[in-house]
C-alpha cells in the first residue's frame, strides 16, 4: 500500500474527529482549457459566520502549514484532471475576470504545486502569481518540473510563504 494512502487515511480520521463531516472541502475549479471539475482538499475551516482566520481550526492551520490539506488532489492527478506541477486551479467564477494573458494559465493542466507556489505561494500578489503561471506555461519541461517538486518539498518543510500578509487565505481575485 502506498505511504500516501496511509497518511491520507490518518489525516481523514483527524479531520473527522476534530471537525466532523464532511472531511473534504469541494469546490468547482477550472482546469486545462478552462474545463470545470470538482476540486477536493481536506476541510480546514468550520462552517458558519466569521472571517476565514476565525473559522480555520487548529488542525486546519497545521494541515495548511504542512500542505497535508492538499493530499486529496492526488486523486485528481491519477484521474488526469490535474498534474503534479502546473498553475494552481482557481474557482470557475474567476474565468470572466482574466485578461487574455492571465487566461493562458489554462493552456496546461493545473497542478498541486507550481512555479508561483515556489516563488511566493500566497505571499505574492495575484498579478505576480499570474505572471509566474504564464512563465511556467511558456517554459515547462521535465527538468523544470523536477526542480519545482524539489523546491516545493523545501518550502513545505520550512513552512515558508504560506500566507498572504498574515491572513489564512488569499483575497478574492476581482480582475486586473
Image (cartoon, rainbow, N blue to C red):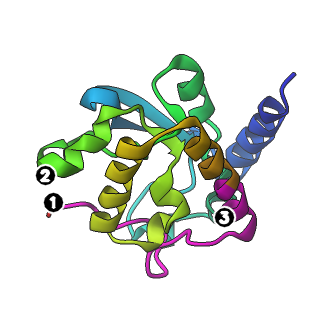
Q: Circle 1 sits on which residue?
A: 175
Disc nearest the viewer among 2 and 1 = 2
Q: Secondary structure at mark 2?
A: loop
Q: Residue at 45%, 58% (x, y): give it.
A: 116
The residue pinned by badge 3 equals 155
Vertical relation: 84 (above or below) 35: below
Q: Nearer the viewer, residue 106 or 163?
A: 106
Dot 2 crowding, Cα within 10 Å, few <14, some 14–19, many 20+: few
Mark 1 vs mark 3, CA separation in Å: 28 Å
CB atoms of marks 2 and 1 within 8 Å: yes
Q: What residue is drawn where x is 27% and y is 65%?
A: 127
Viewer-nearest residue: 74 or 139: 139
The vertical placement of 113 against 116, above or below, is above
User: Badges 3 and 2: C-beta atoms under 8 Å apart?
Assistant: no
Question: Which residue bears the numbered disc 2?
Answer: 99
In terms of image quadrants, where is residue 58?
bottom right
Magenta portion: prevailing SS class: loop
> Where, by quadrant of the figure, is residue 105 drawn?
top left
Q: Is residue 58 visible?
A: yes
Q: Secondary structure at mark 3?
A: helix
Mark in the foreground, 1 or 3: 3
Locate residue 36, reporting x and y percent.
30, 28
Residues drawn in magenta: 151-175
Q: 115 or 21: which is nearer to us? A: 115
Q: Judge left or right: residue 56 versus residue 34.
A: right
Front in this rendered view, residue 72 or 100: 100
Most distant residue in the bottom direction: 165
Earlier along the polypeptide chain: callout 1 or callout 3? 3
Q: How many marks?
A: 3
Q: Secondary structure at mark 1?
A: loop
Amino acid at each position: 500500500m502506498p505511504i500516501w494512502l496511509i497518511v491520507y487515511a490518518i489525516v481523514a480520521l483527524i479531520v473527522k474527529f476534530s471537525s466532523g463531516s464532511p472531511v473534504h472541502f469541494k469546490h468547482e475549479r477550472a482546469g486545462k482549457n478552462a474545463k470545470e471539475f470538482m476540486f477536493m482538499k481536506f476541510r480546514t475551516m468550520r462552517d458558519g459566520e466569521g472571517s476565514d482566520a476565525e473559522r480555520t481550526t487548529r488542525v486546519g492551520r497545521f494541515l495548511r502549514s504542512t500542505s497535508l490539506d492538499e493530499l486529496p488532489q492526488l486523486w485528481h492527478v491519477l484521474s488526469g484532471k490535474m498534474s503534479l506541477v502546473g498553475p494552481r486551479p482557481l474557482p470557475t467564477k474567476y474565468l470572466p475576470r482574466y485578461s487574455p494573458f492571465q487566461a493562458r494559465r489554462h493552456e496546461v493542466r493545473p497542478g498541486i504545486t507550481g512555479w508561483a507556489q515556489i516563488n511566493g505561494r500566497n505571499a505574492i500578489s495575484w498579478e505576480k502569481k499570474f505572471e509566474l503561471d504564464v512563465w511556467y506555461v511558456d517554459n515547462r519541461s521535465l527538468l523544470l518540473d523536477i526542480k519545482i517538486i524539489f523546491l516545493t518539498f523545501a518550502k513545505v518543510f520550512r513552512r515558508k510563504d504560506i500566507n498572504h500578509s498574515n491572513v489564512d487565505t488569499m483575497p478574492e481575485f476581482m480582475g486586473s
